Amino acid sequence: MLVDNCDFIEQVNIREGVKTYINLSFSNQFYDEVFVQSVNTLFLPMICRPILWKKGVIGGYITEALRSYANPDQSIVKSNPKLIKQSNISDKQIDCINYINNVPFKINKFVLSFVFKEWGKEDSILFKGYNKLHVKTSEINSHISSEVYKEIQAHNSIYYQNYNTIMMATLYKDKVFYIPTFLDFRGRLYSKVSYLSYQSGDLAIYLLEFYGENNNNDDLYKNIKSDNNNKEIFKESFRYIKQYAGNVYKLSKKNYNRKRKMV
């Protein structure tokens, strides 16, 4: 009765040996609706500069309601109730959070355009099949093994991660935005943003770009290289950039020369 009268519930028959189990799961339509209607504001980038953290001042989000919700302990540190003593924080750590929170970002429209083209391709070199739902998604209500069911769920999870990231990038493509962060009780820094974050998936990293008054990379390259005092520093820095770019493009297992050629 529940399946027949609700579009958001699907019946899944899972076969284990000679036995068949009937499970109820949410439909793809449900997940789409949840994403549109229930995106938590805290998980979105900010389009205005976050408030600076100071002693006696709760920083981050603009409204008091969001600040209280994001920081229920009114602290820049996300506490752990299991700890006997809560973490102390230094002025340098506060300065670090304030600096990182106020770094402006924008969407790289050239990359976004390329992503859109790849998203519509049958044989996408970027998504490698994860721009479409699993081919057996329509069979999820039939008698399938638990292995196939897990395979479908894992594949579709990546698909929705990519889909949501692209939708968020489209929403912010004409905006300058900021990514609020916090410290955990160990002193590690994390972003509160789910999709468009440098701590998110590879796709989000590809789409993010630093925003500034002068984003001309060619001019920046010439200015740095023309300064004799910076030549050695630039050479070493550029080596690290190539190393990092190679890691981002999933070449972390390759040696440096291989990464350099690919980059």
Image (spheres, rainbow, N blue to C red):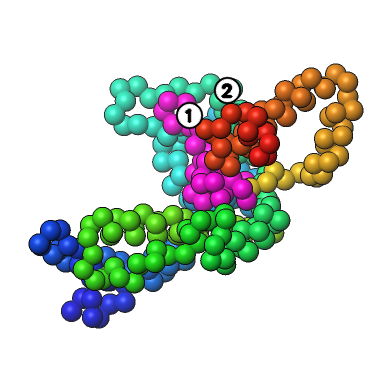
Image-quadrant location for residue 144: bottom left
Q: Which residues are magenta?
A: 178-207
Residue closest to the eye, 217 or 180: 217
Residue 113 sits above or below residue 208 on the image: below
| Place of residue 136 in the rendered image (x, y in percent of width and height, measured from the top left) | 35, 67
Name the side, left or right, on which 15 lies relative to 250: left
| Residue at position x 41%, y 28% in the image | 185
Tell me which amino acid carries mark 2.
Answer: Asp
Residue closest to the eye, 74 or 110: 110
| Place of residue 221 in the rendered image (x, y in percent of width and height, measured from the top left) | 82, 35
Name the side, left or right, on which 139 lies relative to 172: left
Marked residue nearer the N-terminal end (2 or 1):
2
Residue closest to the eye, 131 or 24: 131
- Numbered disc total: 2
Q: Is residue 173 visible?
A: no
Q: Which residue is mark 1?
A: 188
Tell me which amino acid carries mark 1.
Answer: Arg
Q: Quadrant of the N terminus?
A: bottom left
Image-quadrant location for residue 198: top right
User: How far is the residue under mark 2 from the one under mark 1?
Assistant: 15 Å
Q: Is residue 71 visible?
A: yes
User: Can residue 63 be found in the magenta stretch?
Assistant: no
